[in-house]
Structure formats: C-alpha cells, structure tokens
Image: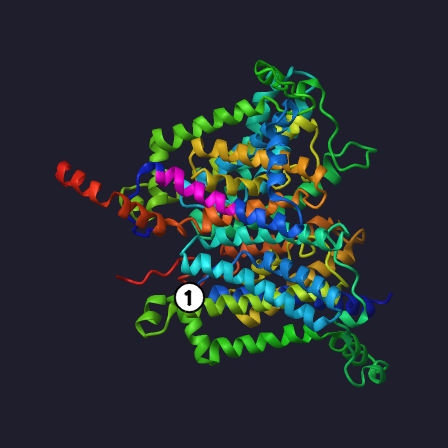
Amino acid sequence: MSVPYAKLPLWVEYGLIPLINLVVAFLVAGLVVLIVGESPIKAATLLVQGAFGYGEGLGFTLYYATNFIFTGLAVAVAFHCGLFNIGGEGQAYIGGLGVAFACLALDGIFPWFLTFPVAVLAAAMFGAAWAFIPGYLQAKRGSHVVITTIMFNFIASSLMVYMLVEVVKPLGSMAPQTRTFLEGGQLPRLDWLLSIFGLDIGGAPFNLSFILALVAAFLVWLLIWRTRLGYEIRTMGASPTAARYAGIKEARIIIITMLISGALAGMMALNPIMGDQHRLQLDFVTGAGFVGIAVALMGRSHPVGIIPAAILFGMLYQGGAEIAFEMPQISRDMITIIQGLVILFAGALEHMFRPAITTFFATLGGAGKQSEATAAGE
Amino acid sequence: MDYFQIVMVTLEATIRLSVPLILAALAGLYSERSGIFDIGLEGKMLAAAFAGGAAAAVYGSAIIGLTAAIVVSVALAMVHAFASITQRGNQIVSGVAINFIALGSTVILGQAWFRQGGRTPQLNEDSRFQAITLPFAETLADVPVLGPIYANLISGHFLLTYFAFAMVPITWWVLYRTRFGLRLRAVGENPGAVDTAGISVTKMRYLGVLCCGILCGFAGAYLSMAVAAGFVKGMTAGKGFIALAALIFAKWKPVNVMLACLLFGFLDALAILLQGQQLPVVGEVPVQFMQALPYVLTVILLAGFIGKAIPPKAGGKPYVKER
C-alpha cells in the first residue's frame, strides 16, 4: 500500500489522476457500446440529456444520487479505518426494516416531520446492528471483515425474504411487501427546490432525504477531519501499529467505525422507502450498496469527492434508463459494466498512470522546481 | 416414495449441486494459496458460463464451448493478476470490479448477439455435455442397495463431474508432493523467502491465478453446458461466494474443500427436499433459513467457534521487493 512515489502537485493528485482513471473507464465502456453496434457518442449525448436535460430527469438523477451519497459515505468511513465494508447492500436492506417499523407504527398518529426523526434513528440503528457483528468479529476474533460482510449480505437477503413473506406482509395479501404508509409515513418531495431554477419535477421522487444526505456528508467530514475520534480512525487506517503505540484502543475504534458505516448505509433505505415507494418491498436496494464502493473510490473517500461521484452515478442510472428507450441494445446492465470499470480503474489500477504522469511533471518542471527548492532552503 | 429412494435422490442432487462449488473453490485455492485473494470467483464463473453457452451454440461443439469458457475466465483472471500483482492494487477491489464487469457484460453481449433477453440459444445434444453411463450400470441396477448406489450415485454423471472429483486428489498431490506446489504455498506464506531462493514471486503468483482462471472456466462450463442447456442471465446466483465460503470453511485444504462443498451442496439439496414439508418437533423449516445456512456456518467458523480459519499469511498483500 505504501508505495513510494514522488510528490505531485495537489491538483494533479486529487484532480488529474482521478480524472484520467475515470476517462479510461468510460473509454472502455464506449468500446463495449461499439461492440454492441451503437454509437458511443450518441449514447453519451442521450445519457447527459436524459439525466440533466429536463426537470423530471434531473429529479430522478438526484433521487438516485441520494442513495449513493449514503452508501458512498458508508464505504468511505470504513476505508479511513482501513476496513473494507462490502456489506452496505445488506446493511441498507436491514435498515429498510427499521424505516418500515417506524412508519408502520407511527404513520397514523404523527405527521411526517415527527415520524421522520424516528425513522432516521431506526434506519441507522438497524443498519448499524447489521454491521456490528462483522465489526465485532474483526475486532475481537480477527475474522476478516470483507468475508463476513459478504456473508452478511446473503444472510440479510434471506432474512428479508422471510420477513416480507412470513411476518410483515398484511393478511390476505399475496405480494411480499408491507402495506402502503399513510401520509404520516411519506416524505415531502423537493419540487420547490427545482422550481427555484424554473424546472418542473414531474413524477420524479426527489425528496427530503437528499437534504439529509448532504447533512450526513457534512457530518462525516466533521467527524473524520475535525474530531478526536476521526483522528483515531485515520491513524488506525494509516498504521495500526502506530495507533497501538499511541494508546488507541484498536477493537473499540474498529467496532465504532463499523457501527457508523452501517448506520450510514442503513439510512439509505429512507430515500426509496419513505421518499418514493411508501412501503417496504423486496430488493429495494437494487445494488446501491455496491455502487457505494465505486463512489467512495472515485471520490477518494472525501465527502467533497463523494457527492459529485454520487451524482455521476445518479446520472448513469437515470440517463441509462433513457438510453435503453432509444437503444434497446443498451439496457441498465451497461451501468453495471461502467461501475465495474470505474472500480477497476479508479480503485485497483489507480496507480497505473502515475509513473508516466510523475515522469511528465518531473521533466516539465525539473529546472523550475530545483531553483524553488534552493530558495526555500531545502 | 420410500426412505431409501428419498436418500438416493437427495444424494444425487447433492453431487449435482456441489460440482460447480468444488471446481470454483479449488480455483480459489490455487490463487489464495499463492497469496492472491480472489472474491471474483463468481464473476469468472459467470463469464465462463456465458462464453461456453454462446460458443457452443454458435459452433455446435461442446469442446469449443469449453475452450471459450476457459479462455474468457483466464482473461479475467489475468486482469486480476495484472491489477494485484504487477500494479500492486487492492485485491479485494479488483475482485469486486471483475464481478461487476462480468455481471453486466454477459447480459449486454448476450442481448446484442442472440436477442433472447440475455439467454443464449438452447443447446442441442451434440453441443453440450451428456451424462456418462458407466459399464454394467444397467445390469447391476437390480442388485439391492449397492446396485442403485452404483447406477445413480457413481454412474450417470457428466464428464465434468468426474473431472471435478478427480481434481481434488490431483490438487492435493500438486500442492503437497510437487516442487510447484511447495513454491506456490511458500509464496503465499513468505514471499520474501521465496524471492531470496531465487524464484520469481511474480511468476509463481501469476501461475496460481492462471490455475484459478482455468478451473473457474470449467465451473462455468458445467453450469451452462452440462446441468443446463444454455446460459441464463445471472445463472451463477451467488455460487462463487458459496465456493469462497467453502474454501474458508475448508481452511484452504483440498480434501476439506471437497467435504465443505459436499456439505453446502447437501444443504442446498435438503432445502429443495424440505420445501413446504412439515417436520416433527420443529415444524416447517423456512427455505430462506436453509439458503442462509452455508453463510451462517462460515461466519461461525470465522468467529473461531469451530476451530480457526487461518488464511495464507501473505494473502492480500502485494509483494514489494526490497530496494
């Protein structure tokens, strides 16, 4: 992990290199479009138009982005501690159970703004609870969190099918879902926010949880870079040995980090359940937990990077649906490929172009830098 | 149906269901023993199943299908090797990426080439693997107890089934009785020592991942060209992860891998058998419980309650030569 590379200017480190990785990922995706026999340029135009060209499209883009901000933050927080939480999918799924319980219990009694805080808390607690066991096992028994969270995704999936089919389904109903929430369990849409810009939201389910996602992003930034706990988390991630010498309690930090990560993933459930479908359904997460991995890698685990990365993937989800209309060859599964390519190039191969770029900047600024260094007395 | 017959049917299903697990878990064993974690078994298996189904349908030959399956699986394995060995990237991230690329591209390409909603065309008799009847299976079938066991459990499987079970002792022999195996295990435990002995760590790890790719190719081909006659989208349905669980459950040992895969296959077969059945004492066992059981068992094992699963020591860490 600690590969010695020459220091690069900040804008290259955090701007140019991620951008190059991203561009390469999209070029390869373009090749797939070519193989399928469609024009990549036309596909890209349709994509951008479908995602940003009109109010309803933008509403859907931001609706999807909301999911990915939550799951991206969840993966990022764990990354800072050197943990790889692949279990966002399962944690979000179980978080949905918390949202549903809160809404089913309160939607007839309270207006939405009283149900909402309870639902947020329930979602976070259920998600955190599902992440607690892998976190505990990693901290106390040394079982690898990657493997346990994968296992917990599958266990969550089985558990939720059981809950929906056998427990929370209303009597006499065939479909494996809860009853539709009353008004007290439905979040208001943010149509006013788009109408400020003169856009009509149409039928897009863009809702209040977007604001909650932005707040969560700010709080994560505060936690990681401005608190003692965040400092301990980052120390653990950078060097567990150093953390141990500094008297940081390893097990405690691992468990707390996993709880926060699971809570963030669980809160993702608010957006589709309380904001859109108003009921708990099978497979409502639809891969958002895994998109979080790509988003966190692309955003370099920083909230400022995660929000645009989430919007980019929101664009892919919404624009992808529009492309499928015009080009039946290119279905939603194209996004899965792009997601994989982004994870590959921005994650596993992130250093591939670094040597070339370093050489380029070394030859470019060789003479100038040397005189600067002398002036600074280095 | 009498009890003997129920047992026979369940055991037969166990064998059928555990073959892809055995192949994929042995594949993972080669890679992980060399120090390269692989959570991309699922993706490689899926891509191989698609390539096998597609090539067999187009060229009408099972051998060409199998070859295509292996080639595609090895290609993905090499991407993983390049990312995690040459580029020293994160092996988990690379595995996740390969799973997604396989999941998406099998559907997109399948739809573009065959236009059957992500399926490949139904394979006919010649272009898929056929069950092999061993000699005397018919004549001996009437012998009580042993006859049906021979005719149903030992005879009447696909060539790939026998291959999978043969790979277990072969893998054991390769791992523990050959120079290659010794070096493979060493490179996963202490690459520095292997490097000092003048053996290329990079080469050994590439070979480990290559073996992994080949076996995943067989596993995929088994799914789309033996048990089923063609590829259906998402047909691996988590089998790659069950295989990964089995590999851990088996503590990275070949014979244990076979036993773990048979156990997980048996649980799967039992889930089908018990669906909607009332059992004494416990009543009806939810099918979801049976489906989750392999994962729960693996977590319990990982927690250290059934022995301890210790992965290869250098697993997951890129090797950096000292400068």
A227 and B237: which is toward the camera: B237
- Residue B30's spot in the image, x, y percent? 51, 68
Q: Give percent across and percent down for residue A282.
A: 70, 39
Q: Viewer-proximal residue, A159 or B191?
A: B191
Can residue A103 be seen here? The reply is: yes
Does the segment drawn in magenta span residue B17?
Answer: no
Specify whether residue B250 is in view.
no
Chain ID at mark 1: B
Residue A324, horizontal then vertical, whole percent:
69, 40
State which quadrant residue B122 falls in: bottom right
**What residue do we see at 36% from left, 61% from top?**
B319
Q: Residue at x 36, y 33 (%)?
A: A229
Residue position for label 1:
B188
Identify whether B29 is placed above or below B287: below
Rendered view: A273 above or below B93: above
Q: Secondary structure at mark 1?
A: helix
Residue B265, given in percent of the width and then of the height, sits at 68, 63
**Number of marks in the image?**
1
Left-right relation of B122 to A229: right
Tell me which secondary structure the magenta stretch mostly adopts: helix
- In this picture, which residue range is highlighted in magenta? A12-25
Amino acid type at circle 1 is Gly
